[in-house]
Image (cartoon, helix red, strand yellow):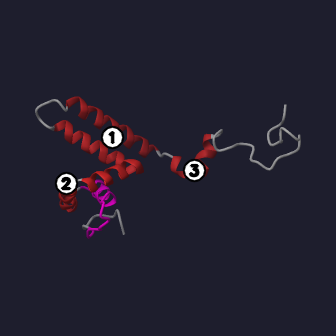
Amino acid sequence: MPRPGQDVRAGRPCHCPVTTWASNPRVANERNPSRRRTAGAVFRMVVAWFLIGSGLLVLPLPVPVGLLLIVVGVTILANDNRRLGAWVRRLRGRHPRFSARLQGLEPHAPGMVRRLLRRTDPAGRKTPAVSGDESEP
């Protein structure tokens, strides 16, 4: 049986690392920082999925609370997930009137929502920073 770091065919040492990024999750996180998750990111993801799930449960009720919960959950997820952010950007590009309304709400939105609206703006325009917004220089 060959030892780690030894070429199987020739029986001589190889120049490859003993542990690969796929076999060791710690090495994977060091080499691929996008896979690294902090406790805060995991907590936000759990809260977002809980909000989306509970929003789907109460969606049939006459009061539109379910829709609000789903939007807040998607907002939280889109701040941490590039694919979801790109999907929101495409969605806003397909519906320019809706995007314009969101753009008008941006100065009044909380910081996390404001950052998401800026990042997912299909036109890429930057609105002037509102006082108290430390998200972007």
Which label is found at residue 119? none
- Determine whether 30 is above or below 115 in the image: above
Does residue 119 belong to the magenta stretch? Answer: yes
- Amino acid type for the residue under numbered disc 3: Asn
Callout 1 amino acid:
Ala
What residue did someone put label 2 on? 98
Direction from residue 64 to residue 134 in the image, left or right? right
Question: In the current view of this chain or complex, which residue is farthest to the left?
Answer: 62
Number of marks in picture: 3
Which quadrant of the structure image shows residue 134? bottom left
- Mark 3 vs mark 1, foreground winner is 3
Work out whether mark 2 precedes mark 3 in sequence or the reverse, and give the earlier one: 3
Q: Nearer the viewer, residue 122 or 116?
A: 122
Secondary structure beneath dot 1 equals helix
- Disc 2 crowd rating (10 Å Cα; few below 14, some 14-19, many 20+) is few
Label 2 sits on what residue type? Phe
Instruction: Determine the residue positioned at 88% across, 44% down.
Output: 12
Q: Which residue is mark 3?
A: 32
- The span from disc 2 to disc 3 (Cα, nearest Å) is 36 Å
Q: Which residue is mark 1?
A: 48
Q: Residue 41 appears at what percent x and percent y?
A: 42, 45
Disc 2 from disc 1: Cα separation: 23 Å
Q: Is residue 4 above or below residue 85?
A: above
Q: In the figure, residue 46 lies in which quadrant? A: top left
Quadrant of the frame with the C terminus: bottom left
Outermost residue, right side: 11
What SS does tag 3 mark?
loop
Quadrant of the frame with the N terminus: top right
How far is the residue under mark 3 from the one under mark 1?
24 Å
Indicate which disc, 2 or 1, sits on the residue closer to the N terminus.
1
